[in-house]
Image (cartoon, rainbow, N blue to C red):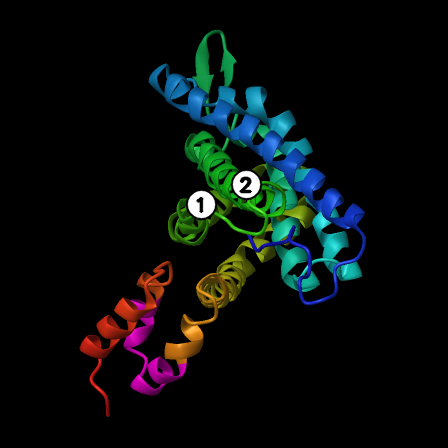
Amino acid sequence: MEDLAYPNTRRAQPLLSRKNYFLAYNGACLVLWSILTLRAIFLIPILFIHDHLYGLHEALHPLLAATQSIAVLEVLHSLVGIVRASPLTTGMQVASRLLLVWGVVGAFPEIVVRSRVFGVRVQHYPGTKGGPYAYAGILLAWGITECIRYGFFVWKEGLGEGRVPKWLTWLRYNTFFVLYPLGILSECWLIYCALEPAAESMPAYNMALKAVLLIYVPGSYILYTHMMGYINQSVISSHNSTLARNSVYSGGLGTSCILPWLLDQGHEVVCFLADVGQQEDWAEVRAQAKRLVPRR
């Protein structure tokens, strides 16, 4: 998901209470998602080995429903302008998850829970054989994503004084490429599984779910490209912040001396500049840069 829980740094930060609020909010979400994710990681292999994966719903769904429902606050945060997130994309992300939690799995638990009649397993609807696997997929995709995201904010706001370790930044911007497709595929499969039970009990709702399924692919592409743009912008911003800190640390003799020359050399030097961003010996950096890209 997008960074919905980070205060808008483009505006002047008000009283310390706002920072404390976001730290408490992100910390609470981190604790809840960590408990949920660790339990899922522990239970999934055990239940899978014993062919009892459908037990995930009974064990984890109440906690998942409560934890995910808290995200409604993030829509409110974006609406009142205290986070730098679009209310539209925030609402789409939160609504899609709440639909899965309450409107699909919550309304039709039979798609992820197998019933038994005299000890014989009964499959009621086509596709529900994969329901427990798709449910495990959203638990892992959502859980790992949110643990990294909220952990990033807690570190940045409370522990790191605005600085985040490289390994956490790497996880935040790279796990997206694996976890996002896993989450989307799992969500689509669960909606598909819910079509037949919805048709039997609520035909109008069945049509609504079909419409949701039809727009899921283009909607997912929009969110994917939006996140890609955000990731690119955030990486560039992170590199600029690192270079600015090093310039100040080296007494103003760092990037202020070589950045104009580097910009004049062309874009090949960007990767080099990112690699040497933590260097303190700027004389050596200038020498390396000159060897890398000859003067024009």
Q: Main secondary structure of the magenta part?
A: helix
Q: Position of residue 248 (x, y in %)?
A: 50, 65
Crowd class of label 2 (few under 14; some 14 to 19; many from 20; radius 10 Å) = many
Say what amino acid the circle numbered 2 marks. Gly
Residue 168: numbered disc: 1
Q: Is residue 244 above or below residue 295?
A: above
Report the residue that reaches farthest toward the bottom.
296
Query: In the rendered structure, does residue 112 fall within the stretch colored magenta?
Result: no
Up the image or down, 138 lies above or below 35; here it is below
Please give the name of the residue rendered at 50% of the width and 19% of the height, measured from the top-left corner. 55
Q: How many marks?
A: 2
**Residue 76 in the image: above or below residue 111:** below
Magenta-drawn segment: 260-273
Residue 144 image position (x, y, % from top left): 48, 38
Quick check: can you spot residue 210? yes
Image disc number at residue 242: none
Q: Residue at x 43, y 17 (%)?
A: 52
Camera-side residue of 43 and 49: 43
Along the line of sight, which residue is nearer the eye, 49 or 152? 152
Q: Amino acid at mark 1?
A: Leu
Q: Quadrant of residue 62?
A: top right
- Look at mark 2 in the image and give the residue it sits on: 151
Residue 163 screen position, x and y as percent: 52, 51
Per the image, label 1 sits on a secondary structure element best described as helix
Q: Is residue 126 visible?
A: no
The answer to if 272 sits in the magenta stretch is yes
Marks 2 & 1, CB-CB < 8 Å contact: yes
User: Which residue shows up at 65% across the image and 61% down it?
Assistant: 85
Q: Secondary structure at mark 2?
A: helix
Distance (Cα) linking label 2 and label 1: 8 Å
Q: Earlier in the sequence, mark 2 or mark 1?
A: 2
Residue in view at x 45 percent, y 50 percent:
169
